Image (cartoon, rainbow, N blue to C red):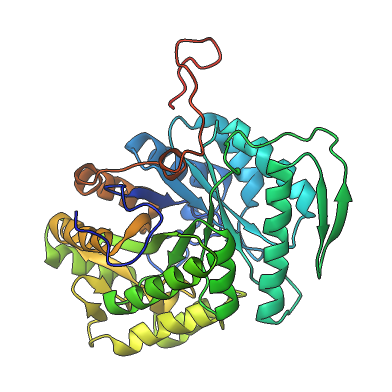
Amino acid sequence: MKEPLISIRSPHLEGAEVAWFAPLCNGDDEFLGRHDMRYKSDWSNTSNVLLTADKLGYRNILCPSSYQVGQDTLTFASAVAPLTSQINILAAIRCGEVHPPMLGRTIATLDHMLKGRLTINIISSDLPGTKMESAKRYQRSREVIEILKQCWTQDAIDFKGDYYNIQLDNTDPVKPYQTNGGPLLYFGGYSPPAVDLCAEHCDVYLMWPETEDRLMELMKNMSDKAAAYNRKVDFGLRIHVIVRETEEEARRAAKDLMSYVDDEKGKEIRERALDAKSYGVSRQAEMRELAEDDGFVEDNLWTGIGRARSGCGAALVGTPDQILAKINRYMDMGIRAFIFSGYPHASECKLFAHSVLPKIKTFSMPEAQGRKPLIIPDTPLGAGIRS
């Protein structure tokens, strides 16, 4: 692997944390624009996707959060945790929904259920029925994170901010299973307040798919901002994938996926989300404008899927070798974490696992960062636990 072109937290790590996506928010289907109740977001379907990813060797899985549709993220994660064997869970939390000390205790409890296999996706979007200026939303998120870190590392909470004023003596709430500060924080956001928050407090900066030069601009900017806080962050990419034996088959599958979506239907789907007008979503729209008539903006990077999605709006489309070459290119750039998804999620999860995943050296980010303490496997407590 080449030396990364930007400053990252983990230049020593070869390979990547390869994750899949758990469709908690009713986004799974065989064809976008034609919802099939067989793929409805419920416990049976979504836990099947997650447990399939666990068995196939994915190292993490994003459990997203949405108010309008689907299931509650932390409830789902706590229910599925005892059923997993090796996969980490990347649980999304919307800052402001839960009183921070209670959220800190909830996360620490879940971390113990997973024996240190918990990671957190920090979300700063508006809460349902509310509208807050961007800078204020991110300030609220900053305060939530600072309180969480006090919960996880101190014997008392003493915090005064714009949104929270909390003084609590220690009543022995559970601390996280992971040492060195608790679960890793993953974060995605593009506005200046978002970038500043990640640079100061978070561990992995998640990006949506864009051209390589635009990704490098984002990574360079984040590296510079983190350096101002005497920190480094790792980088992640959230992206869809369509992998088939031949490029012709992959492109045909991409076309079939969108066969029920016209411009009107696509706009209606995109505008359902609370963050439909965010800066990040607008950047995905720019990618579609830059693409060729067939939707490809770069080799094997197809923006057509974004016609029916408000968030992550592009997919890697191609043969196993083509997909692997693109992933290797991203890793050479310094990207250390990937969150893939495809449609339907369970079947595409299997296709990618069988044809691409075995060719990638993978690791668990909490283990790589020393957050997860070792358990001696021959003790009764540690028997059968993967460290």
354 lies left or right of 29: left
174 lies left or right of 5: right
Identify which residue, 285 or 118, lies in the foreground: 118
Identify which residue, 321 or 30, lies in the foreground: 321
Residue 284 falls in which quadrant of the image?
Answer: bottom left
Report x, y in % for residue 3: 23, 59
164 lies left or right of 51: right
Residue at 39% from the left image edge and 42% from the top image edge: 59
- Image quadrant where one finds the C terminus: top left
Residue 321 falls in which quadrant of the image?
Answer: bottom left
Residue at 31% from the left image edge and 68% from the top image edge: 315
Residue at 49% from the left image edge and 72% from the top image edge: 225
Residue 308 falls in which quadrant of the image?
Answer: bottom left
Residue at 83% from the left image edge and 52% from the top image edge: 158
332 lies left or right of 217: left
Report x, y in % for residue 38: 47, 52
Report x, y in % for residue 103: 73, 49
On the question of residue 112 being in view, the answer is yes
Height in image: 278 above or below 255? below
Identify which residue, 313 or 19, lies in the foreground: 19
On the question of residue 259 being in view, the answer is no
Height in image: 325 above or below 261? above
